[in-house]
Image: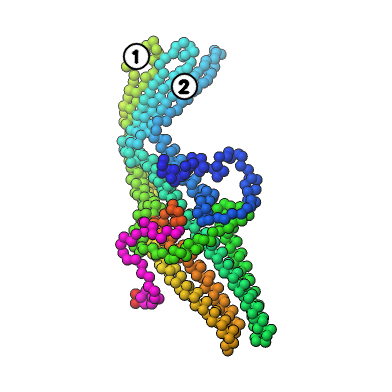
Amino acid sequence: NERSRQILGEEAGTNLVSTTVGERPDTVSPARINQERFADGGRTLTLPAALEMAERHNRSYQLQRETLYLQALSLTGTRHKFVWNPSSTVNLGIARQTDGGLRGDSDADVSVQKLFQTGASVTATLANDLVLYFDGKPKVPDLTLKLTQPLLRGAGAEIAAEVLTQAERDVVYAVRDYSHYQKTFALEVVNDYLDLLQQGDSMRLSYNNYTNRLFFQTEVNARVGGGLQAEFNAKQAQQSVYTAKISYISATNAFQNALDDFKQKLSLPLGTDLRLDFNVLEQLDEIGLPPVAVSDEVGYYLAITNRLDFLNVIDRFEDSKRKVKVARQDLLPSLSLIADASLKDEFYSSFQPEDFTATAKVRLNLPLDQLTERNAYRTSLINFERQIRTLATQLDKLRDGIRADVRNLERQRQNYSTQLDALKNAEEELLATRERLRLGFAGVRTRDIITAQDGLLAAQQALSRAMVDYHKTRLKLLKDVGSLDTTQETFWLKTNPASAVLIGGNTPGASEDVVPPNIILGE
């Protein structure tokens, strides 16, 4: 129960099956849902608030919760087959006799049945003829007990309870998948938020570039008006303004489209005026580029130990082995021990409790046609072979993904370092070019300033992108090795997760120099 509350939430019993909590389904109309799409308003959405809102309202997230809940419901139905199941029937009728008279006919019975995990089945039935009560001749109700125990096919706890075992394991798989989905979904929201911040930052840079081009155009026009430069320089400056304006409009459009997509992910009306918290970029800049001290080999060992979704792959391989055993056992003959005892036709006036009948017998059903069972057995063998290949493939994909993550993280680190130097160089180049133009150096043209401005904008945007990409890759690596704890506050800023400790191997090297290809190719 405690684990269920942790996974499903305190109010999972009702909230999982309705997106409009606390309301009857017949009170929710399509018109109301459509009207909600036109809601507007403004708010500042922080990253923690975005995560909370996504978990509450995202449609895919709710679908995963409902899938888990339905799997748990399926388990309760399977378990119900192995408890005492009562049933009762009452038959009432009137029969016309040959002499034209009418005769009432009625009876009632109550029975309980239980299926045991050994394969045994016990049934107890209590039946009575209600007409005799009205005739004044009541009798002791008929009592029957019956036991059936398979001895070959269907015998044994592993075989008889296979359906229950699989149902319980399916719930475990669903819980693991949901837990892994929670981490994946939280990381998706963080990545989308960071991408939005980066696009917003890029939009600001584009606007600054546009205003700088306007100032430069004014300066060029003054030089042309003073006879210091030719007329075509003014045309070049004007064209530069047009290009910067188009670039800014495109950046604005891209940001607004991405923001609308994010609103849909949070199930917010598109008319909502959403403002983001750009302090997150400053916080990421403050922590720098924290390394992840894990090699691809160590990360692989961590992943097969910590990744809940990968544990499902391993356990499903075990399921396939168990299915082969069950299918093989179904090829055996059906041999059952049947015992029953009954107490019937005893009126109260002559009732003797020791007067009962009992039988015990063995029933053998020889399987003369086993085509269905044979096909099921061969299918289980094929599924087992498939599961072997699936497990091997998943292991290879896991190792390959972690190796790629480690390489990508190092690439992003070097990319950020390079972009930092490139930005410094672009700033110095623009400053030096403007100074040479101001001093009237020969060979310095308006086009040189425009080119330097283009280089500066590209370097600024690339640096902003590189920082966000590094942190996205870092978080992905931590998730892929099973070390990302999304339950922590501001987990995207945590630099030293407890489970991401280097337990062996070497920390991935970060050479400051470019590695020659002959070393990579092993030549």
| Disc 1 residue crowd, few under 14, some 14–19, many 20+, Cα 10 Å | few
Determine the image quadrant of residue 407. bottom left
Residue under the point 56% across and 58% down: 276
Residue type at the position of mark 2 = Ala
Q: How many tags in the picture? A: 2
Relative to 23, residue 407 above or below: below
List the residue tagged with mark 2.
108
Q: Is residue 130 visible?
A: yes
Mark 2, secondary structure of its residue? strand
Residue under the point 36% across and 50% down: 315
Instruction: Looking at the image, tell me whether mark 2 or mark 1 is earlier in sequence order.
Output: 2
Magenta stretch containing residue 493, yes or no? yes
Magenta stretch containing residue 509, yes or no? yes
Residue type at the position of mark 1 = Gln
List the residue tagged with mark 1.
352
Q: How is the image coloured?
A: rainbow
User: Cβ–Cβ below 8 Å for labels 2 and 1?
Assistant: no
Which residues are the magenta region? 492-520
Q: Nearer the viewer, residue 112 or 482?
A: 482
Residue at mark 2 to residue at mark 1: CA–CA distance: 22 Å
Mark 1, secondary structure of its residue? loop
Q: Is residue 350 left or right of residue 266?
A: left
